[in-house]
Image (cartoon, helix red, strand yellow):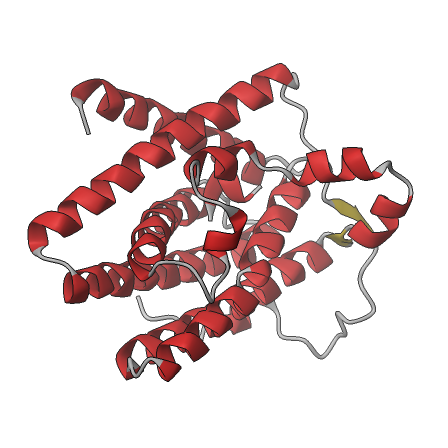
Amino acid sequence: MNFFTYLLHLAGSGAGAYLTARQIRDPLTRPNLLAGFQLAESGSVPFLETLRDRAAKEGDTWLAEKLDRHAADERRHGQIFAQALKRLNKQVIDFKKLAENQPKEKTQANRRSPFFQAYFEGYSPESFKPENIDWIVFFASTYILELDASKDFVRMANVLPEDEPNSASLKKALLSVGQDETRHAAYLYEALERRLPAAAVVQVTDDWRVRKTNALLAMVSNLIQKGGQTQSLVQDGVSPEMSDEKPEIADLNEHSTAKSLEAA
């Protein structure tokens, strides 16, 4: 990464940290941010489980175990954010019903993420299916996202007050999620070290850091074009599946050992 790109990285990371901190503190924007996290965390589970099965078939028991734990963590994170929304009497919108009331072209456009379009520029959707993705690409690209998310969740937790029950509970949950993301980043980096020489590990992670910087710039540019407006991801009410028997946020931390503006 050259010096100019490094400066852009610092600026983009700082802006992202400020925006997510502001959104998590503001009661009006918090639900939409939590919904974005729920969708991102829960949505990654099938992908990781398929990768786990692939690693097992390839005889990489170590990687299969790491991916299994990763998938379990992401499933739990989705529950954490769903529970946080429940506390606010909110739930993720029904995208199927939304699609029925919108032209197909508009629905597809809304689902396109400028961030991920830029982050994975040059790669076809087919190449990113779990049965096809190059392991090095998966390790390096996901390492950068997990590493940054681990810091983002801690920053968001630190701006939440502890004298209000919902915020205090969410603060503990975000710290737990951040610890998990740190562990994910660690195993992904180790996976790179198992397959590449040290110099190659540095190079490939540096390449994906540059991609992340460019993706942040693309995302910010898109937000400016939209006047700062983003699609709402929440609706009032609690999903029937969110029964009272489900654990509260603070009780979902038992497996912790110690995903950020783009997730929204």
User: Looking at the figure, which quarter contains the C terminus?
Assistant: top right
Q: Nearer the viewer, residue 47 or 230?
A: 47
Where residue 134 sits: x, y (%)? 35, 58
Residue 94 makes an appearance in the image: no
- Left or right side of 195 for 237: right
Relative to 156, say whether 56 is above or below: below
Q: Residue at x 60, y 58 (%)?
A: 81
Picture quadrant of residue 8: top left
As drawn, which residue projects farthest toward the right?
Answer: 101
Q: Nearer the viewer, residue 221 or 78?
A: 221
- Left or right side of 149 for 19: right
Residue 110 makes an appearance in the image: yes
Where residue 226 sits: x, y (%)? 66, 19
Q: Residue at x 58, y 62 (%)?
A: 42
- Left or right side of 127 for 14: left
Q: Residue at x 39, y 71 (%)?
A: 256
Q: Residue at x 53, y 61 (%)?
A: 44
Where residue 202 sits: x, y (%)? 15, 46
Q: Nearer the viewer, residue 30 or 13?
A: 13
Where residue 231 sits: x, y (%)? 71, 34
Relative to 70, say whether 228 is above or below: above
Number of marks: 0
